[in-house]
Image (spheres, grey):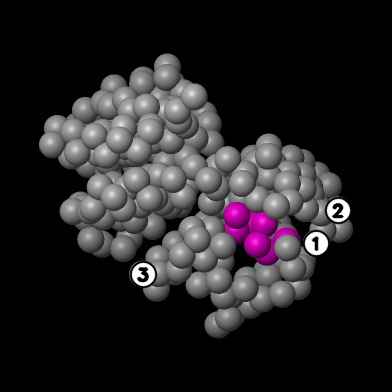
Amino acid sequence: MPKKILIVDDEPKIVEICRDYLRASGFEVLSAGDGPTGLAAARQEHPDLIVLDLMLPGMDGLDVCRTLRRESETPIIMLTARVEETDKLVGIELGADDYITKPFSPRELVARVRMVLRRAGGETPADLLRVGGVSLDRSRYEMTLPEKVITLTPTELEIVAALMSQPGRIFSRAQLLSAARGVSFESYERSIDSHIRNLRRKLETDDGQARYIITVHGVGYKFES
């Protein structure tokens, strides 16, 4: 059964081009032209991935992303015509898995969709990792701590998996980006900090203390149980 992709964008020409390329690549494609319609389609159709424009009528892409993340971990790729890095980082902090800046190549979109779906599909050699009292189940997108179980987005999953694969090793931002995206770009490096902040909020204990992911200033991050 083909993977179902939902495109939420108010520019008909962009929707048409993306739809044609994605369908030619074997995907089933749905579309919506505004925020409320896109949110309703996501809830009703349960797509495998959502391509979500930042600037939408009725409800902007950030609000749609924020709402969806409260309800599901469906992978989201943000489309943005803005060039400011802060706009992209806000999307990442809200739980988007990737972003593409307009104008973009439709072939790049197809490649990004495939990459994010591969991560979401758990195509990895080891589905279960354990470090001390912490376990990571790739197939369920779950991290089990002594105090609770948390659900991860596909990108968060790959970052944690990289860190847990070699406890105590310090990973640079570029190395974590490569693990999460399959490629490393300097312009994306600050997005790792946003993902780490999201992870730490999920990993906090009842007393509000962050644990497990340790910052090594000027170098990167490491995992300690």
Name the amino acid type tagged 2: Gly
Q: Position of residue 95 (x, y in %)?
A: 47, 46
Residue 187's label in the rendered image is 3
Q: Which residue is mark 2?
A: 133
Image point (53%, 46%), residue name: 118
Hey, which quadrant is residue 168 in on the image?
Answer: bottom right
**1 or 2: tag closer to the N-terminus:** 2
Classify the position of the C terminus by image quarter: bottom right
Q: Which is in the foreground here, disc 2 or disc 3? A: 3
Residue 99 in sight here: yes
Q: Which badge, 1 or 3, is on the more N-terminal residue?
A: 3
Residue, far right: 132
Of the numbered discs in the image, which one, if any, rests on residue 80? none
How would you classify the magenta stretch by its main secondary structure?
helix
Find numbered disc 1 in the image and state the secondary structure of the residue it sits on: loop
Name the mark nearer the viewer: 1 or 3: 3
Using a 10 Å C-alpha cutoff, classify the residue at mark 1 as few (fewer than 14 neighbours), some (14 to 19) or many (20 or more). some
| CA separation in Å, label 2 and label 3 | 35 Å
| Residue 13 picture location, percent across and down | 13, 36
Mark with earlier residue (2, 3): 2
* Magenta range: 158-164
Whether the residues at callouts 1 and 2 have beta carbons within 8 Å, the answer is yes
Crowd around label 3: few <14 · some 14–19 · many ≥20 (10 Å): few
